[in-house]
Amino acid sequence: MVNVSDLADDLRIGQRAAISRAITLVESRRADHRAEARELLGLLTPAVSDAGAGGAIRVGVSGVPGVGKSTFIEALGMHLIDEGHRVGVLTVDPSSVRTGGSVLGDKTRMPRLAVRPDAYIRPSPSAGTLGGVARATSQAMTVPEAAGFDVILVETVGVGQSEIPVAGMVDTFCFLTIARTGDQLQGLKKGILEIA
């Protein structure tokens, strides 16, 4: 049983362990955790709304597998911190359709950002959710925002043309692609390129 009020208080003062515990709670599928997560998000939403006009800036980063999403996020995150921002990063890694397991490796591609005190990086499994994000990614963004992170970066799993749910969760959407792939007709097609 989680003391939701204490967890919310710990989040508001920016305790890193509280951020991790809260995201784990929000992502859990257990019925008792779902109820506690709803209560927590209810307590955090007013704090996020009062944090300023519009709260944190939310940026989604998507692209094909291996294009450099993690490398891009590390460079962007380092720049934002140098400009005085606090950066929360939520990465989503694919889960195995055979075992259900997931190699949560994106954080290892951000070694400089991972050690910065004004950065928080949380990898999460997609857990079978399609569309490039996890089931609770949208709700999980509220957690680092409530802890004082003013820019939230969301990295999707490697995606194709139609995985666009992250675009509806963020203020700005970046699609990274590899040069010289496809032809002119490919560039005219709708889907993920249409919203990038």
Image (spheres, rainbow, N blue to C red):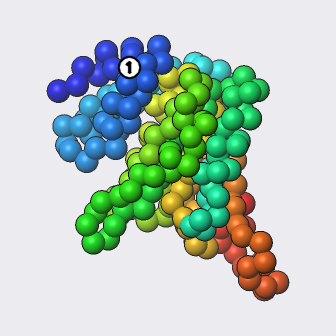
The structure residue drawn at horizontal position 72% and vertical position 32%, both measured from the top left corner, is 80
Query: Of residues 147 and 177, which is closer to you in this image?
Result: 177
Q: Which residue is mark 1?
A: 8
The structure residue drawn at horizontal position 77% and vertical position 72%, both measured from the top left corner, is 179
Can the viewer see residue 171? no
Q: Residue 188's spot in the image, x, y percent?
A: 78, 79
Query: Of residues 1 and 89, which is closer to you in this image?
Result: 89
> Dividing the picture into quarters, in which one does residue 152 lie?
top right
> Dividing the picture into quarters, in which one does residue 77 lie?
top right
Left or right of 140, for residue 154: right
Q: Residue 32's spot in the image, x, y percent?
A: 19, 37
How many residues crowd around disc 1 within 10 Å: few (fewer than 14), some, or many (20 or more)? many
Left or right of 114, for residue 176: right
Q: Residue 156's spot in the image, x, y percent?
A: 54, 56
Query: Of residues 191 and 180, which is closer to you in this image?
Result: 180
The structure residue drawn at horizontal position 74% and vertical position 83%, both measured from the top left corner, is 182
Q: Is residue 76 above or below residue 8?
A: below
